[in-house]
Image (spheres, rainbow, N blue to C red):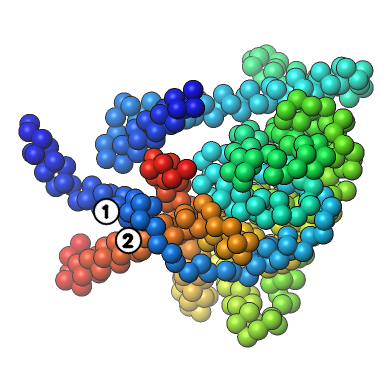
Amino acid sequence: MSTQSKISDFLKDKIQIVNIVFILTIVLPILYPISMPIPISKEVRDAYEYVDALPDGTLAIYSVHLSASIWPEIGPPFTAVLNHIIEKDIKIVFISDAAQGPALIERGIELIGGKSKLGEYGEDWVLLGYLPGAFEVSLATFMEDSSIYSKDYYGNLVSELPLMSKLPAGKDADVFLGNVGGISTLEPVVRQAGPYLPIVVCGISSSGYSLSMPYYEAGSLVGVVPPGSGGAAYEYMSGKPGLAMQTQVTLSFPNLFMVLVIILTNMSFLLKKVRGGT
Amino acid sequence: MAELEFVVAAVVTLVAMSMAFKESWLSRITEHLALGVLGGYATVASIKYLIDTISTQVAGADYINLIPALFIGVLLYFQFSKEYRWVSGIPTSLLLGTMLGLLSSKTIRPQIIEQITATVFSFSGADAMTSFNNIIILITTAFSLFFFFFSAGYSGTSGKLKQFARYIIMLSLGASFGNMYMGVVTRLIDRFMFLLGVY
């Protein structure tokens, strides 16, 4: 079979044409980026203003549920918030309930300029690492006793880290920042950390964003940075454009294409119905 | 070594994407590879935590916490014995009981009281739009609860109410699906940005 006949057979299947056009709507904006307005929603503004108002010396627990599969959604808001925090003298204790979390936290730190941007390790920031087991139980225990971590991610004894002497229990921190995977990781945070600390959701997956809004509206969350437009809005407000803004602009075109496809297919379906077809 | 990492990542990404055009033995291998790597990484990370905890407690002679915890953990492995499987029920029940206790003790305030208060008692907002939104939330919540609580058919007045509630639920499911779709496309964009060398 000649190459030309293979290509023509391939293109006879209309879904392949849709796939190709869909890929072009993603690739072309990446190669030729354009600027677009970024909407700023109330929950993102609340999150930004709260973090911006944190005084120097604030001790924050940053719970990061990152895995490679949701890095594209939660990673950009994570780096956006980190870029904001490094301007202030905020002490951070990173914890994670995902096995890949610590490695991706390090990746996020590299993207903002490296570990030196966060300050001195052990004094200004600590990466405690992955805590296996049910997140509800591990977070509840951490909030009461931080010695549930015996060693940090780098193998140092937690008892020998100066910053951890200020955090005998998670509830002794000043604020809880969370990058959560979805509602299954958000709800333990609301239940176990909520009674003690104000919670700012600095990133959440798209499937969990709509489910987090009842908690934001009820006041359980100070602010929420959703994926996509939320991270872009946060970067815009902090004046440091990055991955989130680029991704958000690119996202507009495949979304528009898909809306067009949905409208066309529904029109075709309705026309068939009107004409009495099946 | 860093270059090899990027080459392997690019090849695996392209092979996985080829599944959109035609499934092949290569794309199936990438699926198995992804699952295997995820499972293996999580296993190693968990074992590392266990070794760190045990070694720290042995070094500090903290046997009061260590020995019961190890004993209960070992009991879980009786799951693999046909005759003594019931023994693994003891640590399982301890784990489940602890989790349920922690869950239920802290559920009432954020997930029941605060939610009811925010839904039912918050008509006024910062502006007219917020107040309007609050009223819509109350009405749609009431209709959704009506749909699930009452098993009336689709006839009569209750049937019309149920039909309206069904449309509301479908709207919200559609919005959730739209969010989920955007999340999936975001991941695809990330892969294309990687392939095109944006970062």
List x then y, in percent, for residue B123. 69, 81
Image quadrant holding the C terminus of chain A, namely bottom left
> Can you tell which mark lies on residue A79?
none
Q: Residue drawn 35% across and 38% down?
A: B17
Asked which secondary structure carries label 1, the reply is helix
- What whole-number distance in Å separates the C-alpha atoms at marks 2 and 1? 9 Å
Q: Is residue A140 visible?
A: no
Q: Residue drawn 38% across and 26% down?
A: B29
Q: Amino acid at mark 2?
A: Phe
- Report whether B99 appears left or right of A233: right
Q: Is residue A242 visible?
A: yes
Q: Label 2 lies in what chain?
A: A
> Can you tell which mark lies on residue A21?
1
A183 w.r.t. A8: above or below: below
- Report whether A1 appears left or right of B168: left
- Which residue was labeled with disc 2? A257
The answer to which image quadrant residue B6 occupies is: top left
Asked which secondary structure carries label 2, the reply is helix
- Rate crowding at label 1 as few (under 14), some (14 to 19) or many (20 or more) other CA atoms within 10 Å: some
B106 w.r.t. B132: above or below: above
Which residue is nearer to you in this view: A212 or A155? Answer: A155
A73 w.r.t. B74: above or below: below
- Report whether A185 appears left or right of A278: right
* Labels in figure, total: 2
List x then y, in percent, for residue A233. 57, 63
